[in-house]
């Protein structure tokens, strides 16, 4: 009887050791033969997450995150998963990834390109901060917000394509594009959707750096507002920063547009003034937003 009891207990312990639970670690090799750490996100849903400090910091080149790890689907990338991996140049992210947590790629100073899948709804805070060689970022339709300092100091980033689904960029006092000194162009597909974006304050609009807005690859040179637009109950014509020049052309200083847009929530209509942007240091025409 004693030996039978020991056998049953041993069998139960052996069975339990085969069970997995949320948070348990997993390890897999990428197609580049790089060992990568994961953890189970949900045993019930059979999903996993790329773990914090997922790879060796000296790993170099292109990294492909596995779509499945031991039968678990990869759906998220943990906080600081690839932080300070200074030699990786590109990361290929599976289409089913829905969350990329803050600082996931911060300090990846050799990272050149990355594609953010359509399932990702929010770019977390500081997610690409200090990726100084980043030149190509593909943001998919479905993205809703870009977090604080998301692209801070990405000085090689020359253009950014903002999906029409984005409704929030930055938060007060935390510019997602701070230090993006090479940014020259912002691309959009829908001017109405662009006008509905909430910015933490005016300098969190990437156009405060880029100065050039492209709608379906054509630069926006003028913008139209309703003729009866008011700012805090005051007609636009009387609003601070707006004036009529000697040629009778309505003009507004370019950095004022952010204030006008955020305060008035202007919607484009059939009745409008055409407003021209004016650079405070020259008369070069600029994009308005």
Image: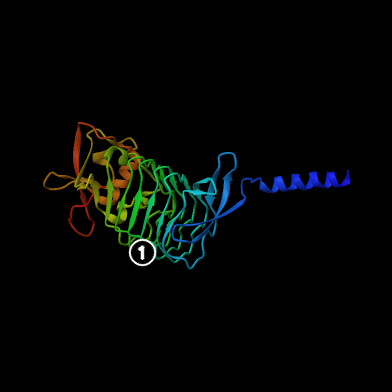
Where residue 44 sits in the image (x, y, percent)? 59, 39
Residue 37 found in image quarter? bottom right
Q: Position of residue 230 (x, y in %)?
A: 29, 36
Compare residues 283 and 127 and report the one nearer the observer: 127
* Residue farthest along the top direction in this orientation: 270
Q: Residue furthest right?
A: 1
Secondary structure found at label 1: loop
What is the residue that sits farthest to the bottom in this orientation?
58
Q: Residue at x 23, y 32 (%)?
A: 269
Instruction: Give x and y (percent) for residue 75.
Output: 49, 45
Of the 4 image quadrants, the one containing the N terminus is top right
Q: Is residue 2 left or right of residue 10?
A: right
The location of residue 217, given as percent across then percent down, is 21, 47
| Side of 110 relative to 270 (left or right) | right
Give the colour scheme of this rendering.
rainbow
Instruction: Judge from the rendering whether residue 261 lies leftward or rightward of residue 82; answer left or right.
Output: left
Q: Residue furthest left?
A: 247
Disc 1 residue crowd, few under 14, some 14–19, many 20+, Cα 10 Å:
some
* Snapshot quadrant of residue 190: top left
Identified at 20% across, 31% down, the residue is 270
- Residue 226's place in the image compared with 112, above or below, is above
Seen from the viewer's position, the closer of residues 35 and 143 is 35
- The residue lying at 54 percent from left, 47 percent from top is 48
Is residue 27 rendered to the left or right of residue 123?
Answer: right
Q: How many marks?
A: 1
Frontmost residue, 120 versus 47: 47
Q: Which residue is mark 1?
A: 133
């Amino acid at each position: 009887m004693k030996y039978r009891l020991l056998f049953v207990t041993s069998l139960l312990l052996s069975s339990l050791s085969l069970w997995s639970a949320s948070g348990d670690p997993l390890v897999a090799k990428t197609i580049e033969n790089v060992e990568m750490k994961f953890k189970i996100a949900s045993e019930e849903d059979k999903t996993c997450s790329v773990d914090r400090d997922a790879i060796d910091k000296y790993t170099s080149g292109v990294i492909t995150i596995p779509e499945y790890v031991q039968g678990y689907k990869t759906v998220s990338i943990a906080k600081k998963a690839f932080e300070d991996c200074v030699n990786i140049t590109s990361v290929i992210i599976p289409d089913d990834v829905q969350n990329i947590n803050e600082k996931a790629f911060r300090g990846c100073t050799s990272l050149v390109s990355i594609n953010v899948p359509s399932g990702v709804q929010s770019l977390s805070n500081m997610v690409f901060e200090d990726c100084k060689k980043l030149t190509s970022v593909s943001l998919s339709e479905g993205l809703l917000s870009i977090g604080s300092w998301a692209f801070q100091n990405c000085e090689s980033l020359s253009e950014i394509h903002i999906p029409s689904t984005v409704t929030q960029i930055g938060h007060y006092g935390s510019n997602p594009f701070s230090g993006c000194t090479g940014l020259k162009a912002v691309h959009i597909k829908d001017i109405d959707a662009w006008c509905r974006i909430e910015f933490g304050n005016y300098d969190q609009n990437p156009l405060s750096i880029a100065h050039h807005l492209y709608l379906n690859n054509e630069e926006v040179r003028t913008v139209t507002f309703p003729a009866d637009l008011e700012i805090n109950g005051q007609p636009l014509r009387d609003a601070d920063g707006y004036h009529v020049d000697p040629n009778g052309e309505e003009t507004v200083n370019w950095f004022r547009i952010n204030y006008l847009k955020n305060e008035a929530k202007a919607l484009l209509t059939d009745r409008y003034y055409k407003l021209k942007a004016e650079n405070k240091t020259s008369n070069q025409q600029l994009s308005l937003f």
